[in-house]
Amino acid sequence: MIPLLHRDTPFPPVEQALTYPNGLLAAGADLSPQRLLNAYQRGIFPWFSEGEPILWWTPDPRMVLVPAELKLTKSLRKTLRNGHHEVRFDTAFEQVMRACAEPREGQNGTWISEAMIAAYGELHRLGYAHSVETWLDGELVGGLYGMAIGRMFYGESMFSRLPDASKIALARLCAHLQTQGCELIDCQMNTPHLASLGGKEVPRSEFLAQITRLIQAPAMSFAVMA
């Protein structure tokens, strides 16, 4: 059994998370900015479907991406050099979240509910949640969003309406994070897609040691030009 959290209940130690399903730690509480920030600082994130209680996760191992180790294919490098696209930061945060919530082939429903959109929208207004957007001819064609605390970036979701549109945003993000001294992007759980981009699994204990150090650093700037 996992503990049921109330509004003021602290998270249990991450070592108490289940091994199956991998990383399920607790249920309940709320999606307030304070709760979400506390969760990310402890390597915990919310992931649940509409109609379920809020579920909190901290998987072991953890999927991460070092910004300098992003793998770019020859075709993507060519696309980046061509420069027909425009990449912007934080100009369409809610649009990106709603695009990430759109139905995808082979998936039933979405975990990005209205409650999640509202919660992360508030974190965006507070300067913690950020979007990276790929635009073409004035149209939003891809992007991603995530959380930044100190020198740590926590990736949440990405979408593409054209081939490589989300990868363009990720490449731009990785380049920017390197200028800001960010050493790690949290990718949460292993997928073949993330592995193909250079993501790798690390033990949860190693992940927690890294984020404990990185979140203490001064906040990164996302006030960048396209």
Image (cartoon, rainbow, N blue to C red):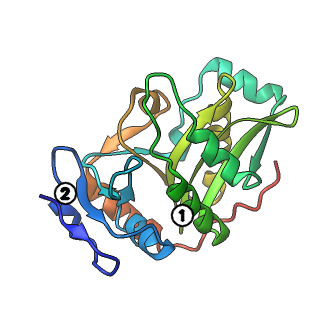
Q: Residues within 10 Å of mark 2 (few under 14, many from 20)?
A: many
Residue at the location (74% across, 24% down)?
79
Extreme residue in the left direction: 1
Q: Could you tell me residue 28's position as x and y percent?
A: 31, 65
Q: In the picture, which quadrant includes the N terminus?
A: bottom left
Q: Which residue is mark 1?
A: 119
Is any part of residue 174 visible from this angle?
no
Q: Nearer the viewer, residue 175 or 186?
A: 186
Callout 1, which amino acid?
Ala
Secondary element at image label 2: loop
Residue 26 spot, x, y in % from top left? 24, 62
Q: Residue at x 45, y 33 (%)?
A: 194
Marker disc for residue 17: 2
94 sits left or right of 81 in the view: left
**Residue at far front of view:** 51
Give the crowd class for mark 1: few <14, some 14-19, many >=20 residues within 10 Å: some
Q: Is residue 145 above or below residue 140?
A: below
* Residue 121, quarter of picture: bottom right
Which of the marked residues, 1 or 2, is nearer the chain's N terminus? 2
User: What is the secondary structure assignment of the residue under circle 1?
Assistant: helix
Q: Is there a contact, CB below 8 Å, between mark 1 and mark 2? A: no
**Residue for point 81% across, 32% down:** 85
Where is residue 132 drawn, in percent x and y? 68, 47
Judge by depth and name the residue closer to the eye, 117 or 50.
50
Q: Amino acid at mark 2?
A: Ala
